[in-house]
Image: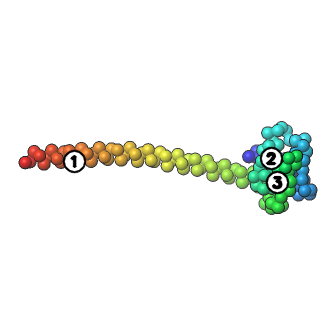
Amino acid sequence: MLRTEDISLAQEVLKILDEEELILISQIQEQASGEAQVERVISSLCKYRAAERGKISLDKTSQTAVVIVEGGAEYIYNQEQKDQLRVIQQDKDLQLAIDEKKRNKYYSTVALIVSLLSLIISAAAFIISL
């Protein structure tokens, strides 16, 4: 996932891919602040099909121009942020569903006990009235 400090490098890679058919990974490494940044940029570009990873290069794809038109690295960054927020919301929804099931299990157990007690009291009252 791209960080804000990765946007300029990703944008530069997209610019080179738009002008040429490929960029060597070593060229990206020269411009990057570290290997982690290189991997973040490459994986994000590949995830959005703006590039395809080869053994020694990133290659231009049919989606490269589309991503650039959409906003380039800024577009990818914003989409990844939206995806992350969506995942966080899904996790919250899942936790709410789990909590609700636990609560329902508790209430159903209490309802069963109350029903059994009611049945016992009704049976006792019937027996006493005989």
The amino acid pointed to by label 3 is Ala
Q: Position of residue 78 (x, y in %)?
A: 73, 53
Instruction: Assess disc 2: are there few (<14), some (14-19) or many (≥20) residues with their C-alpha within 10 Å of its C-alpha.
Output: many
At x 82%, y 53%, the residue is 52
Disc nearest the viewer among 3 and 2: 3
Q: Position of residue 88 (x, y in %)?
A: 61, 47
Q: Is residue 108 left or right of residue 49?
A: left
For residue 51, the mark is 3
Q: Earlier in the sequence, mark 3 or mark 2?
A: 2
Q: Is residue 80 left or right of residue 87?
A: right
For residue 41, the mark is 2
At x 82%, y 50%, the residue is 53
The amino acid pointed to by label 2 is Val
Q: Is residue 43 left or right of residue 125?
A: right
Q: Which residue is mark 1?
A: 119
Depth check: 74 or 91 in front?
Answer: 91
3D distance between C-alphas at marks 3 and 1: 70 Å
3D distance between C-alphas at marks 3 and 2: 10 Å
Q: Is residue 117 left or right of residue 128?
A: right
Q: Earlier in the sequence, mark 2 or mark 1?
A: 2
For residue 111, the mark is none
Q: Position of residue 22 (x, y in %)?
A: 89, 53
